[in-house]
Image (tube, helix red, strand yellow):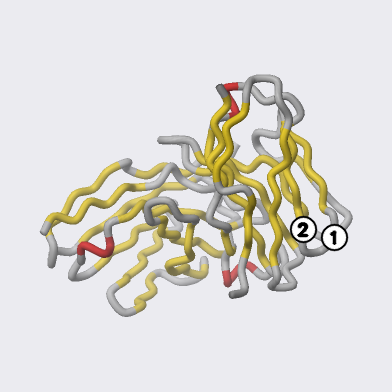
Amino acid sequence: NAGVTQTPKFQVLKTGQSMTLQCAQDMNHNSMYWYRQDPGMGLRLIYYSASEGTTDKGEVPNGYNVSRLNKREFSLRLESAAPSQTSVYFCASIRAAEDRNYGYTFGSGTRLTVV
Amino acid sequence: GEDVEQSLFLSVREGDSSVINCTYTDSSSTYLYWYKQEPGAGLQLLTYIFSNMDMKQDQRLTVLLNKKDKHLSLRIADTQTGDSAIYFCAPGGFKTIFGAGTRLFVKA
């Protein structure tokens, strides 16, 4: 089925460990986004990529890095995980930043716990 | 920065109407979205309204937009237990801002 695929679905890390969250979409979308969801705080934008080859910071980029590997894939890296990064991470995509009548397509999320 | 505010909880009886309200600060949004999130899942686009409209109806869903007051609402008619979920208001821009979400409980 067409959509946004995130891996892994669950992860437990120790403080200071690193990991990369993977996201891939097969809808030929140009723009991709990483959000984190915390209870009572909605979704907060971490990084986004308006098109292949570009990335920009969102609202809460500290402690994260991203790579737009190609048009399909947009990864999120935690270099040194901290308990404050315990959250649910969502990847989303849209055909083009200006093509917003369709809204975003979201992945099913990665539940990350940092202990 | 831009902000979106929603009530965190709403409880209704099955068959009643649900009204979820949202206020926002970004007046430049061309599209204003409502997303639904079921437990353990990502967000799914429920409906949207274009900023030059006051109302949009889509089967059991009615979206009302008051641009002057920057107020958006979602009405669900004949609410069913399957409507239990978190509903997010999201005034769309280049970087869409999401509200905290309203958790709708539907009592049988």
Residue nearer the viewer, A77 or B17:
A77
Question: Label 2, on which residue?
Answer: A73
Whole-Å distance between the Cαs marked 1 and 2?
6 Å
Q: Is residue B85 left or right of residue A93?
A: left
Tell me the subunit letter for badge 1: A
Residue B19 horizontal/vertical position (percent) = 25, 58
Q: Residue at x 36, y 65 (%)?
A: B64
Q: Residue at x 77, y 53 (%)?
A: A49
Position of the C terminus of chain B by quadrant: bottom left
Whether residue B69 appears in this view of the structure is no
Residue B44 horizontal/vertical position (percent) = 47, 63
- Crowding at dot 2, Cα within 10 Å, few <14 / some 14-19 / many 20+, comes out as some
Q: Is residue A64 left or right of residue B66?
A: right
Q: Are marks 1 and 2 on the same chain?
A: yes
Rendered image: mark on residue B83 = none
Question: Label 1, on which residue?
Answer: A70
Q: Residue at x 73, y 43 (%)?
A: A76
Position of the N terminus of chain B by quadrant: top right
